[in-house]
Amino acid sequence: MVLATDAAAHAAGLRVGMPASKAQVLVQGLVIQDANPAADAEALERLALWMLQRFAPIVAADPPDGIVIDSTGADHLHGGEAATLAILVEKLASVGLRARATIADTWGAAHALARFDPRPGFVSAPGNAARDVAPLSIAALRLASDMVRDLRVLGFDSVGDLLAQPRAPLALRFGPELGRRLDQATGRLAEPIEPIRSEALIEVRRAFAEPIGAAQTVARTIGELSIQLCGALERRGLGARRLDLICHRVDSQAQAVRVGTGLPLRDVKRMTRLLCDKIETIDPGFGIEVMILAATVTEPLLPKQASSSLIDQPEPDVSGLIDLLANRVGEKNLYRAAPVASDVPERTVRHIPALAPETGAEWPGRWPRPSRLLTRPETIDTVALLPDHPPASFTWRGIRRRVKRADGPERVFGEWWKRDPELTAVRDYFRLEDDAGERYWVYRAGDGEDPLTGSQRWFLHGIFG
Amino acid sequence: MRLPSAIESLRAQVRQIEGQHRRVSTALAFGVPAVDSRLPGGALPLGALHEIAGGGNGAIDGAAAALFAAGIAARTRGKVLWCLTRLDLFAPALAQAGLNSDRVIYLEGGDEKTILACFEEGLRHGGLGAVVAEVARLPMTASRRLQLAAEGSGTIGIALRRWRRQTEASDFGQPTAATTRWRVSALPSTPLPVPGVGRPRWLVELIRCRAGESADFELEACDATGHLRLPTDLVQRSDQAEGGRYSASA
């Protein structure tokens, strides 16, 4: 029997579930490989571990063909839920895996939406699990195939049909499994994810005789776990780049916190500080039974000689502060600006990580640049002599300003190697000063003569100090 | 002979009460005698919070105020944390005011609350040269916390006040715990003998200054090392108008 096909085989008309002999008849020289469920499961585990290191602290394989990730408390490192999904799918595509990903309230809903919803990268809004799952086919409910067949015979097609039915007759006919799957999808029944662990992971754990819940107790335990983990890391000569704190609650739900660091970290005080900053995101519920602190991603960290104060004053180390802030506002929102060799003003700046090595590069300082650059140039009405005079006056945001002094033009040519329409595009930048002394950066799209070079309209692009 | 020593001891007592004895706070001179002479101690104290706003349209765009802050930050040592809510700051301009791109770490916060929290965290750390935050509202409690954090670590904190609408700028009259409060507005640039825009000039008003008097100055904008300069035509005149206020209409 055919269990899986690739794109070429699908195009040739082979379908999952058809007998192998029929497939061989349909396609000449068909390459057939025996199914190896054990190796598949192993590969899925490996993929889950890879995701554990990159995306979220709670990851589990969802055999035969899925991986479930509890993204709570980990999206901030990638800039939100939608961005996390996009990065995830893109990373998988770069290693040759085609994946469909969805974020939803529950494991059941995410499982169903990822497989049966046509929208790629769909993020279900919180509290919408039941509504989003309702139009899907009942095959999405993780039920045994004969049960799905029987339900179809009875006329149930979508999950919504089942949700609208009274439960008792269904339970009588199909057993408790159906109700359980429905409740798991809509979130009425909790479904804990058993996170995948590996031998190679450096982790320390602490189990409590009595469940704990107070923030102070959690903070103290974090301190103790940090000491243990730093000891374990030191023995191996490693530093943590990503730390996961997993709290198992008495109701067998797991709460996880993930923090990332810019440089390998093995300092108890800073580790405690980073984790304690996130305590408020942990919901202890009825109490926490077990706390696990794991260094998911590690890098070698060897002792190095500190620079002597005799020679030069060492630059104070700000990596601790950077980590703290990055975990608060997201790594994407903390950056340094680096120059890009481009004449188009909005393309001259690129963002690099805050702790990237110093580039030493600077923008060419020949021409003054405005301290505020509008993200979107705004149209202005001008009175200007063509082709190369600065405006005599202009109207911006409803206020007319008379130009007293002006500098320019500074001609910027389009970057034809980036986009075709830029082949002939030209901008002429002028620096204007009005009679109140306010200085503006305006440009004309086009060279003032040739209509091919631009619309010849004027825009205000920046404000000088 | 007794009088100065009595005043000295009283001053020491006041300093002790104000809590500035915790750390010997250093100061940063502007290098412009006319400005430095108006500041207590002859320089801008480093372990303190300073407020800077723009005047006129600058209250909304804060273009001149940002460069004034960049000039101060450029003359400190170490990295600079710049907290933003709106993404229109253009890094090449800061580099032209002497603040190299390698020194500035930008932080984008979604709301003002995050910005203020990160501002305080940066000040408390003590390893940074300066922390600049663009905020609209600066309540008394928040500014007090920031001032204490700056005093504790010796890092200079600059609150760049910037509002969405002109009417909200009246908020700048509300008291805060900042050590100094400045308003920077653009003035017509230095006249050139040829057509063109000369070196920008600012009207820099020292609106409030703890243990000092307010004053206003007409200055030329930051050069490539972050230093301000007194316009040459005013330098000539300052001999005649010694100790007087530099008039805005000059």
Image: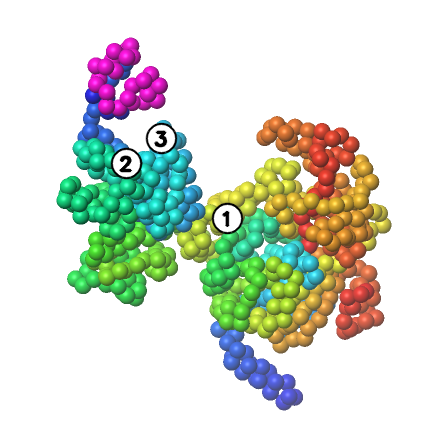
Chain hosting mark 3: A
Question: Residue A335: which numbered mark, if any?
Answer: 1
**Residue shown at 66%/62% (left/top)?**
B166
Picture coordinates of residue A199, whole percent (x, y): 22, 42
Drawn side of residue B68 relative to residue A317, left or right: right
What residue appears at the point 64 percent right and 88 percent down from the top-left corner? Answer: B3
Disc number lying in front (2 or 1) = 2
At horizontal 37% and vertical 50% (from top left) the residue drawn is: A126
Q: Can residue A24 be found in the magenta stretch?
A: yes
Q: Nearer the viewer, residue A11 or A155?
A: A155
Residue A291 found in image quarter: bottom left
Left or right of residue A176: residue A134: right
Q: Is residue A79 left or right of residue A370?
A: left
Task: Look at the picture and state if B6 lies above or below A135.
Answer: below
Q: Secondary structure at mark 1?
A: strand
Q: Which numbered tag is attached to residue A98?
A: 3
Query: Is there CB contact under 8 Å for labels 1 and 3?
Result: no
